Image: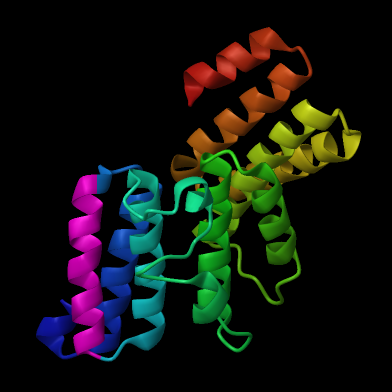
Amino acid sequence: AGLHGGDLTHAMVCTYFHGYLAFHSGQQLSQQIISLEHFSRAMSEYNSTTLLRANQGYQQAVVNFIGLSGQGRNRAMLKGDVFNIESACNRDNAFLNEHMATLQLVLACMLGQYELSWITSEELQRLDARLESFIFYIEAFFRGLTACSLYQSSKNQFFLKSGKTCLRTLKNGMKRSPATLSMYLSLLEAEIATLESKYKTSEKCFSMA
């Protein structure tokens, strides 16, 4: 619609969020990489620099998940031939910083690099003027999962309390978007219930996810 109406900015924003939602909704990675490459070509053609970099971040994440990056154990780092988080982001671009740091958190958490995901989540906590958008709650969910994993290995109560704080954040978000966040809330609630040996609650929450 944006391209037909001549609104290139709107078109490129919609293109970016199409790939972004496909990634976070768990669509097949082999299909995602094709779409993301196509989106990057369009963004490059229309000089959408910020969105191009963000889209390339998702390209790199998918490449790392599939195992095509050639990085071996370093797949949890959002860096490679397509995108390097260390050089692509800058202090003046709040959108890119938040989205790419959250993506780094997701990548590290899902690949079991919990220390890296916790460090990244701490960096996200220090960002200024964050909006309570979908990406904000994605960060809360994966920060909560990371905290649960670190509590399980360290038995440090700080991490359990942090996980519960993330759970409260998701519960507040449910008031605005119950359909979108219900799965994330149920999964994190199940993880915390398991850590507290509340197995009936855990089973119930897992079945609702």
Q: Nearer the viewer, residue 160 or 88?
A: 88
The magenta stretch is 30-46
Q: Residue at x 84, y 38 (%)?
A: 161
Q: Residue at x 58, y 64 (%)?
A: 101
Name, please, the residue furthest toward the right.
157
Q: Residue 45: image x %, image y %?
A: 19, 88
Which color scheme is applied? rainbow
Q: Residue 179: image x %, image y %?
A: 44, 41
Name, please, the residue furthest toward the top.
200
- Indicate whether residue 35 is drawn in magenta: yes
Q: Nearer the viewer, residue 27 or 186?
A: 27
> In the rendered image, which quarter is residue 192 located in?
top right
Is residue 175 among the parts visible in the rendering?
A: no
Q: Residue at x 86, y 28 (%)?
A: 155
Left or right position of 1 against 121: left
Left or right position of 186 against 150: left
126 is higher (above) or lower (below) than 3: above
Q: Residue at x 35, y 70 (%)?
A: 82
135 is higher (above) or lower (below) than 92: above
Q: Residue 165: image x %, image y %?
A: 77, 44
Q: The N terminus appears in which quarter of the rendering?
A: bottom left
> In the rendered image, which quarter is residue 56 located in?
bottom left
> In the rendered image, which quarter is residue 57 located in?
bottom left
Q: Residue 208: image x %, image y %?
A: 49, 22
- Indicate whether residue 191 is drawn in magenta: no
- What is the chief secondary structure element of the magenta stretch? helix
Left or right position of 151 against 156: left
